Amino acid sequence: MTARTFLRTPFRTLTRSSSLVTLGAGVLMTTAATTANADTFQPIWSFGNISLNYLDWSSGTEARTASNAAKSDFTFVEIEGGAGFSWGEFYGFFDFENPTNNQFNESSGGKDNFRTAGKVTSHIYLGDSPLSIYAHVYDFRDYGFNAREQDQILGLGYRTTFDNGLWFKPFIGAARVQSDGYTGMNGYMAGWVAGYDFSAINQNFSVTNWHEQTFGRDDDYLEQNFVGDKAGSVGTNGALSFWWHPSDLITTGIQYRYSENKLGTPNDYQNAMIYSVKLNLL
């Protein structure tokens, strides 16, 4: 999110590759659907929402990044959803950042460009064990700078729920990046998503956290995909969130967003608060 990079990769090549992956996945799913029991594709759980969000970078972050992928507060609209089946589960979101702005925002010098970010994650269960084949794809585009980066992770996941209702899903996998400045294998990523639902003062609340730790990243990537300097090989990215659910239709919350050696800025900690209102559709 909000990574201003000055990178170049032929968009036609990226599009062709993405199209082949999408086509292959579609063929596999269609074939499976014709041979499997109908219950196989009946979700056990699902959710979907659309939200309006405002991200407010700390003044320290804005000062630290002024000359290396400068950050500016912004509004974004997000579409989010997920579903679980007997054999696996999926989650995804797609963000429209600065949705009313031009691709290149003249008044901000490009800090408030129209941008998009999307992510899809999956756990394919390994039998009845808590282990899974884990995969995720994250895609970011800054249209004003013609910048694009896509992170692809494939590895192992784990799923557990504790007696008190806390759920925890860690993962680790090999990383590949496809971007304007560097395309190829890019070390490893480990992380988790976790959450806890609870009630207080006759209201429903939840706390969630997602965290990603990248390590062993390629030197060429660290030199070419960051602004102003070479980044460290270890990168941190995540958010800690508190949600209030006043009704089935509405969720509102605040998130503490954090990162280091990510988002186009090398060797500096970045943090922000995100204020969100969600309309729950499923």
Image (tube, rainbow, N blue to C red):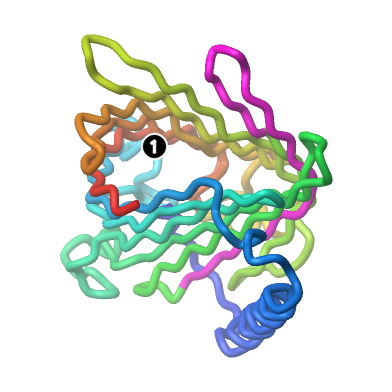
Residue 23: image quadrant is bottom right
Relative horizontal placement of residue 24, taking residue 95 as reference (left or right) = right
Q: Position of residue 30 (x, y in %)?
A: 67, 79
Depicted 207 relative to depicted 9: above or below: above
Work out which residue is located at the far top of the displayed protein and give it: 201
Residue shown at 83% from the left, 45% from the top: 127
**Which quarter of the figure has residue 243?**
top left
Q: How many marks?
A: 1
**Relative vertical location of residue 180 with respect to residue 199 in this rendering, above or below:** below
Q: Which residue is mark 1?
A: 64
Answer with left or right where residue 234 lies relative to residue 243.
right
Residue 162 shown left or right of residue 94 in the figure: right
Percent position (x, y) of residue 254?
Answer: 29, 31
Residue at x 36%, y 59% (from the top left corner): 95
Residue 148 painted magenta: yes
Residue 157: x and y in percent read 74, 40
**Residue 224 visible in image:** no
Q: Amino acid at mark 1?
A: Arg
Report the magenta residues as a range: 147-169
